[in-house]
Amino acid sequence: MIQVRLAAPGVDVEFQAASGITALFGPAGAGKSFILDAIAGLVTPASGRIIMDDRILFDAASRVNLPARRRGCGYIARQWALFPHMSVRDNLLFPLARLPRLERHRRVKETIEQYALGDAAPRYPRQVSPAERLRAAVARTLIGEPQLLLVDEPACGLDIALRDEWYNVLRRVRDQTSLPVMLATRDPETCFELAGSMLLLSAGRILQSGPPRQVFDQPVSVDAARLLGMRNLFQAEIAALDPGRNTSRLRLENFELTGAYIPGHLRGDRVWVCVDPGQLRSLPHDGSKPQLNQVVVRLERASQLTRAVRLEFAGGIIAEIPRHEFERSKDNDDNKEWLVEFPAAAWRVL
Amino acid sequence: MPALWLCLRCAGVATLLAAAVCLPLGWILAHRRFPGCELLDAAAGLPLVLPPAVLVYYLLWPLVFNWQIAVGLSAIYTLPLVLRLSRAAMAAVDPDLENAARILGASEWRIFWRIALPLAWRGLLAAIAAGFARSLADFGLTALVADHAAGAPLVWALLAIAGVSLAALYAGNRARVWA
């Protein structure tokens, strides 16, 4: 359990993290790395307090500031920071300098077995494979039994195979130990795959926190939704609200949407509507009259994704449909009219 | 060849003295910000602008000349050069590695010996070699010219100076930390 309250120029955050993985999600410059560095003791915030399991690591008011080597944190930097002039075994021995010799070698032997580093142990980091280097970096961090693990941008610039390996290692840490892990990332997939909770950061502030599923399903504001990489954000005006029949009508720029009653709003309110591109139904327009929640728009561009086709329509509407569906429809050239349906369950109001 | 031996001994001891001060100081100046660090940096560069005659005349005139005093003088004049070069070599060490060591529980002393020195050794060697060459050039030539048995030793000394300078240049060019 770690409690953090930090303030520095451009950063002002307060949060707690228990065991499991907590993701710090935000764009570059949001203050993710600063928070990790402040917890590890590499930078000193202007004010605030950091408490880990009833141990004060930093308190500006009472001028407590434990040096990094006494904080008991594990930190895995972006480039892993294995010492290039030491063999993998010496890297593993480095954090154990204070232990008696026999104990030191016993632990290193166990760790080498546990992380399958037998072949790599006598070699230098640049002589071993990236996967081994990764395991060595994690092993070196955990061999000293830290009380908290900090990871900076685990997936940044890695190929897919290595990223999977990384995630497996982190999952193992999460499932086999009760170590709290804090992970800075710019990748929403990482949050979903690993984290039990996430903090959405922007410009040094926390916009939203909670389990990733909840944060992505219900962004608190349009800024949060943009940071989460959501497309199809439209401004709308509430044209009608009927709690009795549980209906509402929203007027967008050039079409209207009808759906369930929206609690907490009044008629005439300006709101933001958000739809996942994958949940829009789109077909080439056959000349029929648009039904409820349907709109006829011009296709501006179709681009291929790995398993789907992304359709960009006039008015900023973006839809994704499976490739076979796209190829089946004959008139799939650009600049053709399409019929796009916003199913009532798909869109939500921010 | 007493003259050659004298100047080699002088330059060697002076370089060692300068290195003992400059290696830790260079490391501190490369990575630390503390009140007065700029001042310290400037003060360490003072011998560069101070004419040797001033120092010799005012500080050493009353004393009898012996080789220990020559070593002290030479060390003072070598210090700025070794400091600049060793500071640059230390600054080239990836701060992530030092931070990693810090978080893994290493004291600053241990980081200096186990991380900074081994990673910057090529650059530091170049700094020391350059310091030695400078010291030899400054003091050695004067001593040799003053020495009446000049001749063959002078040639040897010049060769030594040229060799050491070349080695320093070469090491400086090769001074790259581990890829």
Image: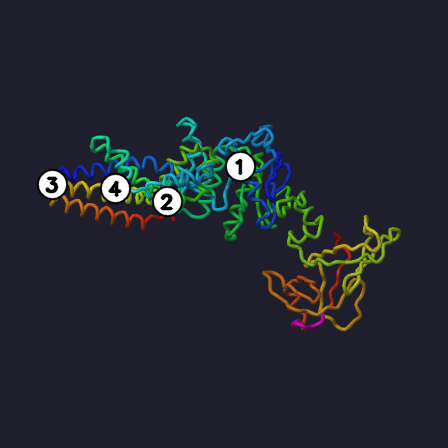
Going from N to C along the chain, the mark reached first, 2 or 3, is: 2
Q: Is residue A234 magenta?
A: no
Q: Do the numbered discs 1 and 3 sit on residues whose CB atoms are within 8 Å?
A: no
10 Å crowding of disc 2: few (<14), some (14-19), many (20+): many
Please give the chain letter of the residue carrying mark 1: A
10 Å crowding of disc 1: few (<14), some (14-19), many (20+): many
10 Å crowding of disc 4: few (<14), some (14-19), many (20+): many
Q: Amino acid at mark 2?
A: Ala
Mark 3 vs mark 4, CA separation in Å: 21 Å
Disc assigned to residue A29: none
Along the line of sight, the residue nearer the viewer: A178 or B78: B78
Q: Amino acid at mark 3?
A: His
Q: Disc 4 designates what residue?
A: B135
Evaluate whether residue A346 shows in this view.
Answer: no
Q: Disc 2 designates what residue?
A: B89
Q: Disc 1 designates what residue?
A: A40
Q: Are tags 2 and 4 found on a single chain?
A: yes
